């Protein structure tokens, strides 16, 4: 996943001072983002600013990268009927 997948439009003239190229991976950009006091990075492509990355946009991008999982698990236990005990299983 590239950092360009996490960009937000630049809505103000307050451009972050640190820039990264849009081809940079999210994992490479994350330490740079966390190392800035602004907690924002300007994303450039061919020398032009195409947007910004913030902590929240980075989290959103990483969340899309991780596959969804069920919120529960199933555990199956087998034992002979004469050894069945709910308290032993618990």
Image (spheres, helix red, strand yellow):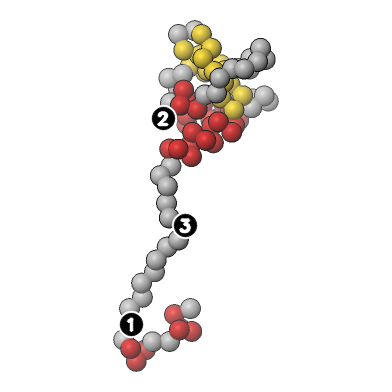
Picture disc at residue 79? 1
Confirm whether residue 35 shows in the render.
no
Q: Is 27 displayed left or right of 52 in the figure?
A: left
Q: Please identify, in this view, whether the residue under mark 3 or under mark 1 is nearer the observer.
A: 3
* Residue 37: quarter of image: top right
- The image quarter containing residue 56 is top right
Give whichever of 26, 28 is nearer the camera: 26
Estimate the spatial distance between the alpha carbons at disc 3 and disc 1, rounded to whole Å: 27 Å
The image's mark for residue 1 is 2
Q: Closer to us: mark 2 or mark 3?
A: 3
**Alpha-carbon span between mark 1 and mark 2:** 46 Å
The residue at 42%/47% (across/down) is 68
Residue 83 position, x and y percent, is 37, 89
- Callout 1: helix, strand or loop? loop
Disc 3 residue crowd, few under 14, some 14–19, many 20+, Cα 10 Å:
few
Image coords of residue 74 (percent x, y):
39, 66
* Quadrant into which the N terminus falls: top left
Give whichever of 59, 83 is nearer the camera. Answer: 59
User: Does 18 sit left or right of 66 as displayed?
Assistant: right
What residue sits right under mark 3 in the picture?
71
Give me the disc on residue 6.
none
């Amino acid at each position: 996943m590239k950092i360009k997948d996490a960009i937000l439009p630049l809505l103000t003239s307050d451009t972050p001072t640190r820039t990264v190229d849009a081809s940079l991976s999210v994992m490479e950009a994350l330490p740079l983002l966390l190392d800035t006091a602004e907690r924002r990075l300007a994303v450039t492509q061919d020398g032009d600013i195409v947007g910004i990355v913030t902590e929240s946009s980075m989290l959103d991008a990483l969340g899309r990268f991780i596959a969804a999982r069920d919120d529960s698990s199933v555990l199956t236990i087998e034992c002979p009927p004469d050894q069945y005990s709910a308290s032993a299983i618990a």
